[in-house]
Amino acid sequence: MTLCKAAADLDTTKCRGSRTAVTVGLNGVGEFKGCEFHAARRLAFWRDGYVTSDDTAARSRVLEESRRLVDAAS
């Protein structure tokens, strides 16, 4: 199974949606194109990361899901 580039190395969860929907990044680590699902998980883990996309709705969904994941973990 091939996952998007935003999936963490040990994450085996299937991608949801386009595997190039957004770009998630962290200064000093790099940028990864990926699905919204894995981008949100990566962003929640990094906390100081960022997400970009030409699709503002996709970017908003990733930010919202990332915040939800952070809140659930606290």
Image (cartoon, rainbow, N blue to C red):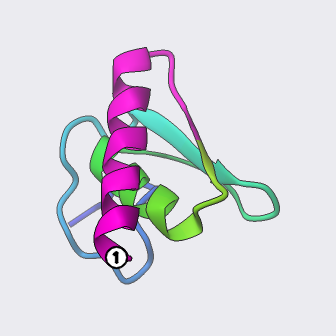
Outermost residue toward the right in this view: 28
Residue 11, position as x, y percentages in the image = 32, 76
Up/down of 57 relative to 7, above or below: above
Q: Measuring 24% from the left and 75% from the top, which residue is drawn there?
A: 12
Nearer to us in this view, 7 or 57: 57
Up/down of 58 relative to 9, above or below: above
| Residue located beneath label 1 in the image | 73
Q: Which residues are magenta?
A: 51-74
Q: Please state if 15 lies on the left or on the right of 65 as rendered.
A: left
Residue 4, position as x, y percentages in the image = 37, 53
Give the crowd class for mark 1: few <14, some 14-19, many >=20 residues within 10 Å.
Answer: few
SS at circle 1: helix
Q: Please state if 52 lies on the left or on the right of 63 as rendered.
A: right
Q: Main secondary structure of the magenta part?
A: helix
Q: Measuring 28% from the left and 61% from the top, which residue is drawn there?
A: 2
Outermost residue toward the bottom in this view: 10
Query: Identity of the amino acid at label 1?
Result: Ala
